[in-house]
Image: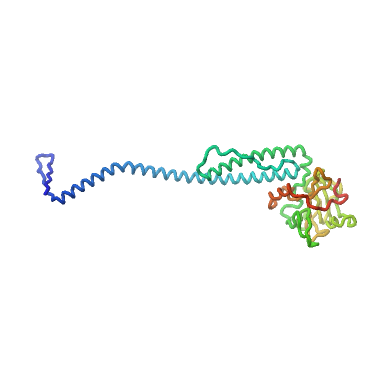
Amino acid sequence: MYEIQLHPADIRKQVRYYFLSRSAFRWLVGAAVALGVLLATGAVLAPLGLRSLLLSGRLHALSQQHALHREVFAERTRGLERMEREVANARALQRQMSLILGADQGAETGLGGYPEPAGREYLDPDVRGAAERALKLGSDALALLTLSDELATFARANRDLAEAVPSICPVPIGSFVLTSPFGNRTSPFTNTVDFHSGLDLAAREGTPVLAAGGGKVSFAGRYPLRRNVRWWRYGNVVVITHSERYLTVYAHLAEVDVRRGQILRRGEQLGTVGNTGWSTSPHLHFEVRVRSNNSSEPMPVDPRIYILDYQWSGHEELLVRGRNAPVPPFDPLPSGMSGS
């Protein structure tokens, strides 16, 4: 048996006595020890809990900030992609202009060179990749500006050539369908493979046909059968010479509105779409021929390379083929058509 006495501070009050058995005393001691341990643990953990609470709030704020940064990064990446497409389109146009003007700007291999690596190492691979793309884009854009300045200088020095280039579609945009492209095809008349030296643009009969570039009419009418049967099959034909380099052919016309020797500006009407000669339906057969420096005979090229006011499918591939394609077998211009 254990006795516990509680003496009040006021001596006038009665002393209180509590009697505990051994087991009760042990329970009391155990509870006191447990309470002491709990208080000590709380004293140690309370600052940690407060710190954890503060860190949790900070982590939440950082998570929101990270999400915002990812949104900004995604938007900047989309902007980077748009600029890459714009530079690629500008590069294709520069190549096209270089090709049709005959300005020698080389193969442009490695346009933009090798950009310097990012100034610091980014841990996030997406950010590192975007930084490298941005550096390359800047390098490509600077190189493209240099090539474009060279091309502009060439055009200014050859103003007559630039005005003569057959660079617009000879049929109004939206009024035609391309039914036969440039290159080998199966002839609808002989059912054999032959080389098609131009474009067949199907359109309603009477649709205006326009001069693709400024030049002089070197032939207008129908070529005599007795002199050349193949060119007679083209029906009513207009041939325009553009400076000393280019020549265009407009065949199967219904009406011919120009005469030999007439000077035309780019976009002027020269006739209308028809179905004359060997033709299965109304359409315009359109050719662009180019006279190289070492040849007196103008050679046919894909007109789609020269037309700037209409975007053809496979544009980049056309430009590559235009630079590297071998000269195909073709029918030379008959006497009196070349204007030379």
Is 257 situated above or below 48?
Answer: below
Residue, far right: 226
Pick the front one: 111 or 141: 111
Question: Residue 162 or 329: which is nearer the viewer?
Answer: 329
In the rendered image, the quadrant that contains the C terminus is top right
Is residue 90 shown left or right of residue 230? left
Q: Give residue 41's position: percent from left, percent from top.
A: 28, 44
Determine which quarter of the picture holds residue 83.
Answer: top right
Find residue 254 and report its horizontal and vertical position in percent: 82, 56
Residue 209 in view, yes or no: no
Vertical comparison of 167 with 176: above or below:
above
Q: How many marks?
A: 0
| One can see residue 184 in this view | yes
Instruction: Judge from the rendering whether residue 93 lies leftward or rightward of residue 135; answer left or right.
Output: right
What x and y, as percent, mark residue 197?
Answer: 78, 53
Residue at screen point 79% across, 61% down: 192
Q: Which colouring convention does the figure follow?
A: rainbow
- Point 59% across, 38% down: residue: 116
Percent position of residue 293, x then y:
80, 42
